[in-house]
Image (cartoon, helix red, strand yellow):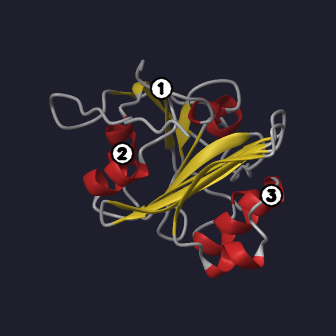
């Protein structure tokens, strides 16, 4: 699996943020299928947006999730100590994130998940302390494991991970951090929506 760096900081040490907002949409919006997302153990969404190098940033409510299925990345308000960043842009190379580098820059644990049912590509990665702990990716169309690094976790073994589907990825995310398909309830806080830097 091609894993490239997605790190870029602005010269003033913060993301270049526009204060554009949308109306309504303060209900948490679930996701998890036909997309990719990061789960980062932090409540500092602005730092996540900055480290990802997002440009054209707008402060948006949870409707940013819907937008992220078309383009861009939405960094959601934190949930139980985790910040989720979701967007189809994270699905395709060269935008697979380098979780080890992100972990090193943010000084915390970083996880990445992908579910793509057209080619049946499903994968995940987990880094802590700036080091890659686990990475796995499977392409169902070719029945090929394209990444398999690090010690297999107990949860993965229980889920029979070697031929995963979308539900495998979601269940693993639920065990490791946050189940994005179960997001619900009112949350009026704004997240950050922007586009990834050109490779």
- Residue where numbered disc 1 is placed: 20
Select label 2 or label 1 by which is in front.
Answer: 2
Crowding around mark 3 (Cα neighbors within 10 Å: few <14, some 14 to 19, many 20+) is some
Front residue (pair 137, 110)? 137
Horizontally, is 124 left or right of 97 in the view?
right
Q: For marks 3 and 2, give the CA distance.
A: 36 Å
Q: Residue 186 location, x and y as percent?
A: 68, 58
Q: Residue at x 36, y 45 (%)?
A: 46
Q: Residue at x 41, y 61 (%)?
A: 43
Q: For marks 1 and 3, give the CA distance.
A: 42 Å
Question: Residue 166: in sight, yes or no?
Answer: yes
User: For numbered disc 1, what is the local secondary structure?
Assistant: loop
Mark 3 or mark 2: which comes first in sequence?
Answer: 2
Mark 2 or mark 1: which comes first in sequence?
Answer: 1
Horizontally, is 132 left or right of 91 in the view?
left
Q: Is residue 152 above or below residue 84?
A: below
- Residue where numbered disc 3 is placed: 163
Front residue (pair 19, 29)? 29
Q: For marks 2 and 1, give the CA distance.
A: 15 Å
- Residue where numbered disc 2 is placed: 46
């Amino acid at each position: 699996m091609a894993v490239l760096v997605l790190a870029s900081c602005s010269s003033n040490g913060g993301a270049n943020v526009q204060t554009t907002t949308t109306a309504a949409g303060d209900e948490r919006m679930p996701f998890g299928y036909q997309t990719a997302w990061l789960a980062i153990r932090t409540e500092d969404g602005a730092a996540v947006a900055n480290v990802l190098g997002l440009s054209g940033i707008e402060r948006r409510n949870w409707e940013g999730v819907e937008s992220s299925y078309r383009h861009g990345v939405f960094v959601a308000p934190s949930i139980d100590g985790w910040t989720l960043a979701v967007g189809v842009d994270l699905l395709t190379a060269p935008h697979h994130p380098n979780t080890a580098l992100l972990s090193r820059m943010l000084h915390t644990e970083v996880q990445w998940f992908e579910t793509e049912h057209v080619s049946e590509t499903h994968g995940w990665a987990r880094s802590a302390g700036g080091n890659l702990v686990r990475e796995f990716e499977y392409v169902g169309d070719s029945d090929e494991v394209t990444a398999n690094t690090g010690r297999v976790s107990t949860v993965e073994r229980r889920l029979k991970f070697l031929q995963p589907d979308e539900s495998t990825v979601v269940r693993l995310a639920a065990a490791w951090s946050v189940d994005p398909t179960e997001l619900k309830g009112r949350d009026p806080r704004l997240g950050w929506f922007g586009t990834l830097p050109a490779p």
